[in-house]
Image (tube, helix red, strand yellow):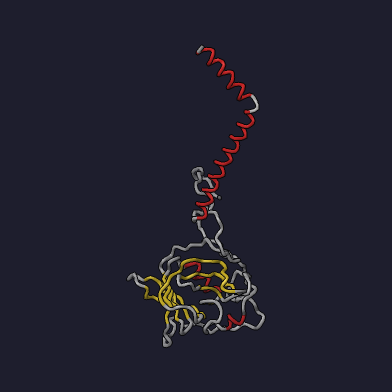
Amino acid sequence: MDFKYQKIKKVDIKKWLLGGNATIYAIILVVFLAAVIFVFASMRTESLKEGQMPSSEPAANTEPESSSNYVEENHQYQIKVNKSQNFLTVYKLGQNMEFTEAYKVFRCSVHKDVQTGTTSVSEKYIWRRLEQSVYGHYASRLGNGAYLHSVPYQAQDTSWLITAAYNRLGSPADIGSIYMAASDAKWIYENCALDTEVIIYEDASETPAIALEELETLADGTRVDPTDERMQANSVPTKIKYMTGVDDCTTPLNAPFDQ
């Protein structure tokens, strides 16, 4: 009896699976798998909402500017900006390991909102929007939120110089942060490393350690900074790398080498 019961039971299960119940079972399985996938997808969405965004996600509030990969490693300079007299002095690290030697002096214009105190270079930009329709070329961002940059332009184009701002070099700025001639801003951009110390102070009695040449003003409509030698919007996209090309090369003894 036991053997007959087991055989009948086996036949019944087979008929159940191959009968009309098979379709219902398949539907239940599909619904179950869909529910599992939905739960995992919901968990991933919640984790992303909590701030675990992928590193490739673009930053919010981007501006029409070109950020630079240029990172100079030269830490032998210190920058001091006299807000009262509107000139900037670059000091070079001396043998006594102190910044006492005035190396360069640039005429600049400092906006009244720029804070005095000690800060440092935190970022660099080929172009940086400073305000609506005002752009700085060779801009070095400071930790206090101000920028060292060229005389402002109306667009990211070196043929759109704000001529009136150039002619006010050496006087307080009414636009931008701390602006100077394009060649001077470019020198800082190329030679002063990130974290270079910048000291902004006021001293109405100070005279430049290196005499400044008289500023030659531009005629209305000039629209070009005469110190900008390259006249290209993105003339220094990255730090210059010397000795690039062939890394490893084998040449026969006494054979000419021309790679």
User: In x, y percent, where is residue 77?
Assistant: 42, 70
Residue placed furthest toward the front: 1
User: In x, y percent, where is residue 95?
Assistant: 34, 70
Q: Residue at x 53, y 15 (%)?
A: 5
How many numbered discs?
A: 0
Q: Residue at x 44, y 83 (%)?
A: 208
Eyeballing the image, is 249 above or below 81? above
Q: Residue at x 42, y 75 (%)?
A: 199
User: In x, y percent, where is residue 258?
Assistant: 55, 50
Residue placed furthest toward the left: 96
User: In x, y percent, where is residue 52?
Assistant: 49, 53
Q: Nearer the viewer, residue 207 or 177?
A: 177
* The quarter of the displayed image where residue 235 is located: bottom right
Q: Nearer the viewer, residue 90 or 255?
A: 90
Eyeballing the image, is 105 above or below 21? below
Q: Nearer the viewer, residue 110 or 187?
A: 110
Residue placed furthest toward the bottom: 205
* The quarter of the displayed image where residue 75 is located: bottom left
